[in-house]
Amino acid sequence: MVKQSQDRRARRSRRMLKESLLELMKRKRFSEISVRDVTDGADMNRGTFYLHYTDTADLLQSLEADLFQELQALIDDHIQESMDDRTLRPVLEPILDCAADRREVWEVLLSDSASTGFLQGLQALIRRNGAPLVEAWFHPQDSSPTDYLLTFLAWGFTGLLREWFQQEMRLPREELIRAAVRLAEGAGGGLFPETQFNIE
């Protein structure tokens, strides 16, 4: 019982520290945020912070890792459907819903991407999970077209998402998904023209 209580307290402390960091990142660049800023925002002492994290970079990496773990779980749940149906839609829909539901977090992390690893981590996630789809759909003879395609898609998807947020998500969700699917599968079809997709 004591251990469970300690675990709950530790989870609560980590959550509050992450929330404090995100609030601070709305107002100032990550490089300007100190441990004291974070602990003051969370109404904690510095000793509690150092029980969980070595510095603000460690805290940020933990926050990003939580989000990447959530995204990977969504992909794992839907990637086989995408592979079987030959469309990215089953994977894109839950990822877009996750981003929309937690827009504030995504916007903060994307807006200060020069100071964080979020953009690079997100693109790595896209490349890593896109590779087996490219292999299954196109059966490329060498890796060069695959690398170009995955790089294009990684930058394209993150760019679409940032633009969607900047335009206050005025474009309906379904239209954004359809555009993303068409752009991605159009690019794939351009490099591997013999492949057929279920665009809709």
Image (cartoon, rainbow, N blue to C red):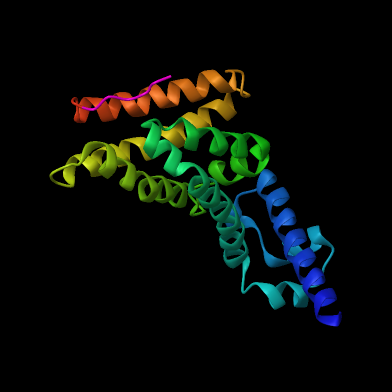
Apparent side of residue 71 relative to residue 84 in the rendered image (left or right): right
Principal secondary structure, stretch drawn in magenta: loop
Tell me which residue sits at (55%, 56%) in the image.
69
Q: Based on the picture, tell me whether residue 199 belongs to the magenta stretch.
A: yes
Eyeballing the image, is 95 above or below 62? above
- Would you identify the image quadrant in which residue 61 lies? bottom right
Q: Nearer the viewer, residue 40 or 195?
A: 195
Tell me which residue sits at (39%, 30%) in the image.
87
Is residue 37 visible to us here?
no
Tell me which residue sits at (38%, 37%) in the image.
84
Q: Based on the picture, tell me whether residue 196 belongs to the magenta stretch.
A: yes
Q: Which residues are magenta?
A: 195-200
> How many numbered dots are placed on residues in this image?
0
- Would you identify the image quadrant in which residue 50 lies? bottom right
Residue 32 in the image, given as x and y percentages of width and height: 62, 56
Is residue 138 visible to us here?
yes
Eyeballing the image, is 150 above or below 117? above
Residue 103 in the image, given as x and y percentages of width and height: 64, 37
Eyeballing the image, is 76 above or below 46? above
Apparent side of residue 13 relative to residue 156 in the rendered image (left or right): right
Tell me which residue sits at (62%, 74%) in the image.
54
Name the outermost residue toward the bottom.
2
